[in-house]
Image (cartoon, rainbow, N blue to C red):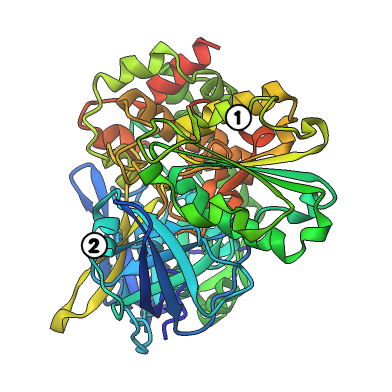
Amino acid sequence: MHKLEKTRLDDFLARITEGREVYALEQTGTQYHLVRSAAWQAGKHTLGAFRPVEPLKALVFRPREWLGTLGDTAPDAVIPERIVIGAKNCDIAALKIHDYVFLNTAPADPLYKEAREKTIIVSCDCTDARPVCFCPAVKEQPYPKAGFDINLAPTELGYVVEAGSERGEKLLKKVGDLLVAADEGILKARDQSRQKISRKVCGQTERMGLSCGADLRQAVEKSQGKKIWDDFAEDCVECGACNLICCTCHCFLLADGKGKNDANVRIKQWDACLYRNFATVAGGANPRRHRAERLHNRFDKKFSFFPGVLGSYACDGCGRCVEACTGKIDIREVLKRAVNEL
Amino acid sequence: MSCSPYMPMPAKLEHVVRETANIKTFFVRPQKPLAFKAGQFIELTVPGIGEAPFTPSSSPALSDRIEITIMRAGRLTEKLHALEPGAELAIRGPSGQPYPLEKYRGREVLIVGGGVGLAPLRALLFALFEEADKYKKIFVRYGAKSPSDLVYRKAVEDGWGRKDMDVAITVDKRDDSWSGNEGVVTTILAPDKLKCNPQEGVAVVCGPPIMMKFATLELLHLGYAPENIYLSMEKNMSCGIGKCGHCRLGPYYACKDGPVFSFDRIKHLQKIWD
């Protein structure tokens, strides 16, 4: 555990990002955006107080991936070495889902594997929350415990810098001259900051009526076929925004078409289970014909399927779907009602 | 060749047999032999158009040329049906879990097919024939809408030339050419028409969802245990390797954990027949 003086942050980040494509946060109004840059830009880039609009998954499971030309011998396009600065815990926890799907379920996805290996993650504790943040309700917290290469915890005494992987440690050695050992005082300050932000997020979640620690798996499993889904589906316009902006949603579609010189090509692109024909088979049969069934399916996948196969919810409480939903469906309201109707 | 599991290998369409007005068997030669086990499926690509999952209908003992019996039902199969021998295709797989033959050995095997659903069961039959002495007896019960909708009609009618098989065929609606049974497939599962021992046998069903539903109910009624009834679950699939999320069936992916499920694994799930 190390300590970094506040005044040396930009120097630290400029040096650890050297030679890599940089993904950093940039503030616009009350939101942060995840932007790509050739280098860390002091003043323009920030660690951010909470997660950006764009989910981190988009860097490793890209919205549209080129798989190649049928029968072609050319190697896949190469992903550059990159580093993300300011990733937040919800997005990092979500990578567990993507790792399960794309790495640990054989066969591994070579594009995902390459992107993951070439992406260094420098995370940062949340110091504030969006009004829609609710990570404590899904067994997460607003600071990372694992899944990062380096984590920065801002305190009034400077930053606590922690390596979470071998490559993170190696990177810290490069900037050893900027770091000193973290003392008890700054560690205590970090713990206090973490408690403070945790209390804030938990408080705003519970004020919504959703308790931090409710059994969401049981609530969603028991809700199948009930009126709750018809009621919330009334407002769903099947735009798929909740799926696409979600930090954990991993569904995709392989699509074929014609490329340059009439070549037969294949791409892999994000798909959304709220779309009407997501599960339709040839001949037209659709196991989820009704919007209510599709809406329930989204929750079932997140709160029943993944707890079953992986032991954790496929929801990290980032609240992006609340902000993106065209029909103003609030996932916290849905979960609250499912829990209350248990 | 890209090593991506999403990319197929080239294959050639060698031969096409018309089975019915809307069903054809495609003889496909992959660039390299593609070994599969009965019940596993492959993804067949029409280049530039797309791909879809199909279970081969030929013997798993043959990996250099694979037969796939396909009904014209959607966008891709429409294109497939328009192809002539010599056409370029692409293929990847196999995917999914095979029929657990080790659980069938030493027992009676009842095969129940509906329409084009006999196609994957044909691969299973060929696998059973390879080691026929290991099975007590093989029964085939096959139904189609009309006599002209029966696939592999000649072979089925003469029991694939085997003396040890018990075969019965039915059509939902007869025509002048038909002197056999008329009625849905459950009418030839009735105890007076099927002299088997449900308590100790296994039943394997493939067909349209409505047929599988009623066949399963009838098999349970006859005394087959839920764990001895094997069903092919048709789901929308894209990647075929448990990643894209399309074919989820409760706690399973049909592509990875299926497509064949014993009834006891899925009976508690809602809407499995839709």
Q: Residues within 10 Å of mark 1 (few under 14, many from 20)?
A: many
Relative to B70, is B35 above or below? below
Q: Is residue B124 left or right of residue A225?
A: right
Name the quadrant of the C terminus of chain B: top left
x then y, percent, for residue B7: 40, 73
Q: Which residue is mark 1?
A: B216
Q: Is residue A296 left or right of residue A179?
A: left
Structural distance between the alpha carbons of marks 1 and 2: 34 Å
Amino acid type, label 2 = Lys
Q: Chain of mark 2?
A: B
Please give the name of the residue rendered at 56% of the width and 47% of the height, measured from the top-left corner.
A190
Q: Quadrant of residue A333?
A: top left
Secondary structure under badge 1? helix
Q: Quadrant of residue A227?
A: top left
Amino acid type, label 1 = Thr
Q: Which residue is mark 2?
A: B79
Secondary structure under badge 2? helix
Relative to A97, is A20 above or below? below
x then y, percent, for residue B119: 50, 54
Q: Is residue A331 left or right of residue B63?
A: left
Relative to B79, is B198 above or below? above
